[in-house]
């Protein structure tokens, strides 16, 4: 029970780890009650996937430990049959199955619907906080708003540009130095602008322009009422799915979703059916063997489930058979293993010791080579102590990483299942997306895996009195820390290299593939026929269409602004434009140009063909969007920040991301410093205590890091403080605990 509860807690936390940053951002931007409401709505969906894994890991760890300590043999010798031995487990499994069934059929769909409602409400209520500098806001009907800079946590806007798209033709625009958003009702907002001007083109004669300047002006913004988005299949009530069983168009996805809910609940029965005989047959793997078996069985089960769902979706298998294929395979395998549970051959038992087999492989191929006389000579480390500690540590770290990757990728697949069915995405596309998602998951999971590895290795050594034996031999306990720190430093360097080489490209590809899976355009613009783009310097481009092959524009408008007060200095309208390689510039056709000084037009000129040297953007610029921090290397992000800072923009949020690129890999080393004294303190509690402590420490770090980063993004903390405070605090705590250790 304890192992199962701990596994449930750990698996749920790993699933939540993906969205923890976004949820913590809401904590800073809104009231804490809403964040707890959101977490409560997300919890049932995570439980549906975590419950079968938790039941399996609890059974395998418990039975493996009993088998390794010969307790199963002693109970059988006292006259207990297998049925009597497994009766308490049957009650526990039945309770877990009932909880999973109720959660999957009723609680999780209702929670999904509630979360969608909450998300829709927050989308409007948090619009002031949702504004990001240098991003076009297109959620307000018939308006496009651009904010060059923000202050006071997003409440004060600077360099505000508003385009009124209510009428066809060129938009009316308003430019202001500053602005604030004032709420007048649930869906009514008012944009208060200061020190600006409005420019209104005549619809009948584009050559006529009305300009009016103002010290202050108010623009009413009527938001769309909160509406419930189209319910994905995972949020549909079970009764609705049953009603659609005979629908001519929707019967297949409805049956797939209904059978999926049942299949995941019955996984609480099928996985233990295989896990019980395997756990009884694991003689030497102990708890490590139980964890490895859990990982292998869960991976096999979900691969079969995903394959069956895909085949059912493609019409190659009936929905019931396709979704239940994994359960049927495990039912047959479990029945066969249970029939042989009383007399499993020793050679079969040895095959189900993956932890021992992995350690043997590691001994043979990684850390040592045979020497004369059968002795083993180490290649890399000066003592057998280093070799022994690192062998166990590497095994646990790899095991933890593999577990995290399996859990998160499986959960991600089923999270996108509704979109996959709706867009008819192929398995190849899904596989490519998950493949390019793995580097980011690996980058984020390494510190937690290192933390678990240190706690398990040192905790188990303390429980087995190996620490006492080392002290008796005159070896200080800090000697154990050296190989762990060395390997953690190598992993931190590997994280940084991964971040600088593979991650930027992989993140770009996985974002693009995710958009395709969800049926969204690869671009972030909501109006594909009305494109806005801020150029280098102080030029704003608006165009109906851009052809990247022929490098031509249709209906192009260019707005130029002054650098000191963000006032409109020039407006260009052209029917079309093309790139001239000989001039190395844009050639505009059939248009006009106006130049301004304040609210006065100082020059107006029509043209048939014209070229402007101030338009320095090349065709490649219009094929890319403003890059995200996760899609840039450290140097690229620093150069991007320098360009924005020279233009007078607020770059605090980007500076937080820049510092995080250095601070996050270092937490891998800090986790070793922090975990080592904790492991020795709770060593008597063994692996269970170590994993529980790892969960608590990881929660503390990720919550504090997420909150501080959100505060830094909202200009409430200096970027260096927001990014480095978690590292400094946890490193100081680790060093303090190390100094207090009796050596």
Image (cartoon, rainbow, N blue to C red):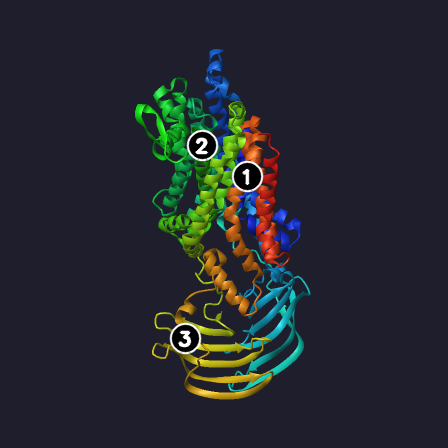
Q: Judging from the image, what secondary structure is the residue with disc 2 in? A: helix
Identify residue for label 2. Answer: 386
First reached walking from the N terminus: tag 2 or tag 1: 2
**Mark 2 and mark 1: span between their CA atoms?**
17 Å
Q: Residue at x 51, y 39 (%)?
A: 48
Image marks 1 and 3: residues in contact by CB distance under 8 Å: no
Image marks 2 and 1: residues in contact by CB distance under 8 Å: no
Q: Where does the C terminus fall, quadrant-wise?
A: top right
* Residue 553 marker: 3
Give the class, few, some or many, for how many residues have Cα within 10 Å of label 2's Cα (few <14, many ≥20).
Answer: some
Residue 570 position in % (x across, y down): 52, 81
Q: Nearer the viewer, residue 605 or 111?
A: 605
Q: Judging from the image, what secondary structure is the residue with disc 1 in? A: helix
Q: Nearer the viewer, residue 301 or 735?
A: 735
Q: Where does the N terminus fall, quadrant-wise?
A: top right
**Mark 2 and mark 3: span between their CA atoms?**
65 Å
Can residue 98 be seen at all in this image of the molecule? no
Q: Residue at x 48, y 55 (%)?
A: 630
First reached walking from the N terminus: tag 2 or tag 3: 2
Residue 310 position in % (x across, y down): 38, 45
The furthest residue to the front: 474
Q: Nearer the viewer, mark 2 or mark 3?
A: 2
Can residue 647 be seen at all in this image of the molecule? yes
User: Within the image, what quadrant is residue 220 found in?
Assistant: bottom right
Q: Judging from the image, what secondary structure is the residue with disc 3 in? A: strand
**Mark 1 and mark 3: span between their CA atoms?**
58 Å
Give the class, few, some or many, for how many residues have Cα within 10 Å of label 1's Cα (few <14, many ≥20).
Answer: many
Q: Nearer the viewer, residue 572 or 272?
A: 572
Residue 254 position in % (x across, y down): 46, 46
The furthest residue to the left: 372
Identify residue for label 1. Answer: 673
């Amino acid at each position: 029970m304890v192992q199962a509860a701990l596994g449930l807690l750990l698996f749920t936390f790993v699933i939540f780890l993906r969205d923890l940053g976004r949820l913590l951002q809401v904590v800073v931007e809104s009231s804490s009650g809403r964040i707890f409401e959101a977490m409560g709505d997300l919890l049932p969906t995570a439980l549906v996937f975590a419950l079968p894994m938790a039941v399996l890991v609890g059974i395998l760890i418990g039975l493996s430990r009993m088998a390794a300590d010969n307790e199963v043999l002693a109970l059988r010798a006292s006259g207990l049959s297998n049925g009597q031995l497994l009766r308490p487990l049957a009650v526990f499994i039945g309770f877990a199955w009932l909880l999973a069934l109720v959660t999957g059929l009723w609680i999780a769909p209702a929670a999904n619907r509630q979360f969608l409602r909450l998300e829709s409400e927050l989308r409007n209520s948090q619009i002031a906080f949702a504004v990001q500098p240098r991003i076009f806001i297109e959620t307000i009907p018939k308006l496009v708003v651009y904010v060059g800079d923000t202050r006071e946590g997003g409440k004060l806007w600077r360099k505000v540009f508003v385009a009124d798209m209510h009428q066809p033709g060129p938009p009316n625009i308003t430019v202001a130095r500053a602005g604030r958003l004032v709420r007048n009702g649930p869906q009514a907002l008012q944009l208060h602008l200061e020190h600006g001007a409005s420019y209104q083109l005549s619809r009948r004669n584009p050559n006529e322009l009305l300009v009016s300047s103002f010290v202050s002006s108010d623009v009413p913004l009527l938001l769309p009422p909160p509406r419930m988005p189209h319910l994905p299949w995972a949020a549909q009530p079970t009764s609705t799915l049953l009603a659609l069983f005979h629908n001519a168009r929707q019967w297949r996805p409805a049956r797939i979703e209904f059978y999926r809910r049942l299949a995941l609940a019955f996984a609480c029965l099928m996985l233990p059916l295989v896990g019980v005989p395997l756990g009884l047959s694991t003689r030497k793997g102990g708890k490590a063997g139980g964890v490895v078996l859990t990982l292998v069985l869960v991976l096999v089960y979900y691969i079969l489930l995903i394959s069956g769902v895909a085949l059912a979706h493609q019409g190659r298998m009936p929905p019931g058979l396709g979704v239940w294929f994994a359960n049927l395979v495990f039912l047959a395998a479990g029945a066969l293993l249970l029939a042989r549970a009383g007399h499993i051959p020793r050679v079969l038992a040895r095959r189900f010791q993956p932890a021992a087999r992995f350690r043997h492989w590691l001994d043979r191929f990684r850390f040592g080579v045979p020497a004369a006389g059968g002795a083993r000579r180490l290649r890399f480390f000066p003592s057998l102590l280093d070799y022994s500690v690192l062998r166990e540590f590497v095994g646990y770290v790899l095991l933890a990483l593999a577990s995290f990757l399996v859990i998160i990728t499986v959960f991600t697949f089923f999270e996108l299942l509704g979109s996959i069915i709706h867009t008819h995405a192929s398995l190849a596309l899904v596989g490519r997306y998950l493949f390019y998602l793995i580097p980011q998951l690996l980058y984020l999971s390494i510190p937690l895996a290192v933390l678990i590895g240190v706690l398990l290795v040192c905790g188990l050594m303390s429980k087995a009195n190996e620490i006492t034996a080392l002290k008796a031999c005159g070896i200080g306990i800090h000697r154990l820390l050296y190989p762990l720190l060395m390997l953690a430093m190598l992993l931190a360097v590997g994280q940084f290299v991964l971040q600088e080489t593979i991650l930027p490209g992989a993140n770009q590809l996985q974002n693009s593939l995710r958009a395709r899976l969800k049926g969204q355009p690869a671009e972030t613009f909501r109006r594909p026929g009305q494109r806005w783009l801020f150029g280098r310097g102080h030029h704003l481009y608006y165009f109906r269409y851009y052809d990247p092959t022929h490098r031509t524009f249709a209906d192009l408008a260019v707005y130029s602004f002054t650098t000191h007060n963000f006032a409109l200095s020039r407006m260009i309208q052209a029917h079309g434009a093309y790139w001239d390689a000989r001039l190395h510039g844009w050639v505009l056709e059939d248009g006009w140009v106006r130049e301004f000084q304040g609210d006065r037009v100082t020059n107006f000129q029509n043209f048939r063909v014209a070229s402007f040297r101030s338009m320095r953007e090349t065709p490649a610029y219009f094929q890319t969007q403003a890059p995200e921090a996760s899609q840039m290397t450290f140097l690229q992000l620093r150069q991007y920040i320098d360009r924005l800072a020279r233009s007078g923009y607020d770059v605090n949020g980007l500076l937080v991301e820049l510092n995080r690129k250095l601070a996050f890999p270092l937490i891998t080393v800090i986790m070793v410093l922090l975990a080592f004294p904790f492991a020795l303190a709770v060593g008597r509690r063994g692996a269970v205590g170590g994993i529980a402590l790892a969960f608590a420490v990881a929660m503390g770090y990720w919550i504090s890091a997420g909150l501080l980063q959100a505060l830094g993004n909202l200009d409430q903390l200096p970027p260096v403080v927001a990014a480095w405070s978690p590292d400094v605090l946890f490193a100081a705590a680790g060093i303090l605990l190390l100094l207090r250790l009796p050596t």
